[in-house]
Amino acid sequence: MVPGIVPWRAALRSRHLRRRLCTAVRRPLVLGIETSCDDTGCAVVDGAGRVLSDVVHSQLQVHLDHGGIIPPIARDLHAQNIGAAAERALRDAGVSLTELDAVAVTVRPGLSLSLLVGLRHARLLARQASLPLIPVHHMRAHALTVRMAAPEVAFPFLTLLISGGHCLLAVAQAPDRFLLLGASRDDAPGEALDKAARRLKLRNLPECATLAGGRAVELLAARGDPHAFEFPLPLSQYRDCSFSFAGLKFTAQKLAASEEQRHGVVASGVVPTAADLCASLQHAVARHLCHRTQRAMDYCQARGLLPDGARRLVVSGGVACNGYITSCLRRVGEALGFEVHVPPPRLCTDNGVMIAWKGVELLRVGRGGTHDLDSVDIEARSPIGTDVSQDVADMSLKCKWVKLTGPAAQPQ
Ligand code: KG4
Ligand code: ZN
């Protein structure tokens, strides 16, 4: 606790700070900076997992206008916003730079141009206040966020990370020790949902105009029939934990085109069967994710990777905001005896909180970052951990799939 760090007038205005007045701030106090993709996130988190500030500047609308993320545009927007976002995060938290214990920043994986903006700003702040800099792996940070509010999620646990750029299954053994069981061979699920939303022109529906593609698909899917259109089951002949979403993306785009033709829809029109198509695509994505996750659960069991009686699955990343997908995963968890943990949607998408928290976790295990600021660099590609996907494939586990719809199955 730093005595007197909270300005009282600011404190009374802020919900976070009002809460803080009742509970002492716990060390370490870390500023997290996230710029790996299209969100500029800055946040201050304390050692008890309390969020003292959470600033996210989203570039979503600009990228929706361009039909996807254009790296130099993303970089320029990060550069325009990072200074104000970091300042605001400190102001909202009621702390000055010198009162922090460290600055944590995403350095891998991600878009190089975007990562560089965050790293340079983090270096600047760390230099100004002689603070250590903690380099953070974006995907590991997604996996650990849930532990802020649910400390009972102890290591090791299984994690499924699903976003616009990533899809992987891993076992988290420690804050910086992961085993990779499988990843996508091509696209991520968010990419398939985003491109389907774009091809269906969902932006032209007022209720979807400002939504991320995946969220727009979910909204429409709620009033559609998940069995109206047939989608292939990717990689069904491979008994491993790898993923593929390119086929689902292609099928969705092809179906959108043929439905437009069938219904004579032109220009900015949306096909009348869009809800059914969204529901069917969402179900196909959920089914593929569930199958690979079920095999990962069996693999963990076969290799004794998780403690009996405390088997947990953590789902995170932007696509984990999807209630249909997580409810299907919960059914798989229930049937196989896994607790399923999903952070609240705000913490599933990219944000500075998860980066700050990862910094806290690393400081706790003595991996406290570095004062040699120039030794920290970015890496566009970076595996989450030791790759055991060949071992998963070699075991060739045959699974009896848990039913995702209808009455729930009994736990095994
Ligand atoms: O983790 P994230 O914010 O950024 C990346 O690292 O990619 O994830 C963004 C992705 C986008 O593809 C977006 O469409 C998807 O998450 N997403 C959703 C939902 N909300 C965001 N996908 C499905 N259902 C949602 N409700
Ligand atoms: Zn992410």
Image (cartoon, rainbow, N blue to C red):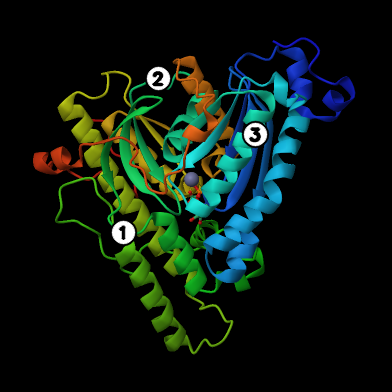
- Identify residue for label 3: 43
Task: Out of 26 and 86, give the one closest to the viewer.
Answer: 86
| Amino acid type of the residue tagged 3 in the rendering | Ala
Local secondary structure at mark 3: strand
Q: Is residue 298 above or below residue 6?
A: below
Picture coordinates of residue 124, whole percent (x, y) = 65, 36
| Amino acid type of the residue tagged 1 in the rendering | Asp
| Amino acid type of the residue tagged 2 in the rendering | Ala
- Residue 395 visible to an observer of this rendering: yes
Q: How many neighbours does mark 1 have within 10 angstroms: few (below 14), some (14-19), or many (20 or more)?
A: some
Q: Quadrant of the N terminus?
A: top right
Picture coordinates of residue 257, whole percent (x, y) = 42, 81
Report which quarter residue 297 is drawn in: top left
- Identify residue for label 2: 154
Q: Nearer the viewer, mark 2 or mark 3?
A: 3
Q: Nearer the viewer, mark 1 or mark 2?
A: 1
Q: Is mark 2 within 8 Å of ligand 2?
A: no
Picture coordinates of residue 209, whole percent (x, y) = 64, 66
- Identify residue for label 1: 186
At 90% from the left and 24% from the top, the residue drawn is: 9
Local secondary structure at mark 2: loop
* C-alpha span from label 1 to label 3: 32 Å
Q: Is mark 3 within 8 Å of ligand 2?
A: no
Task: Out of 80 and 217, give the one closest to the viewer.
Answer: 80
Of mark 2 and mark 3, the one earlier in the sequence is 3
Picture coordinates of residue 245, whole percent (x, y) = 33, 60
Cβ–Cβ under 8 Å for marks 2 and 3 = no
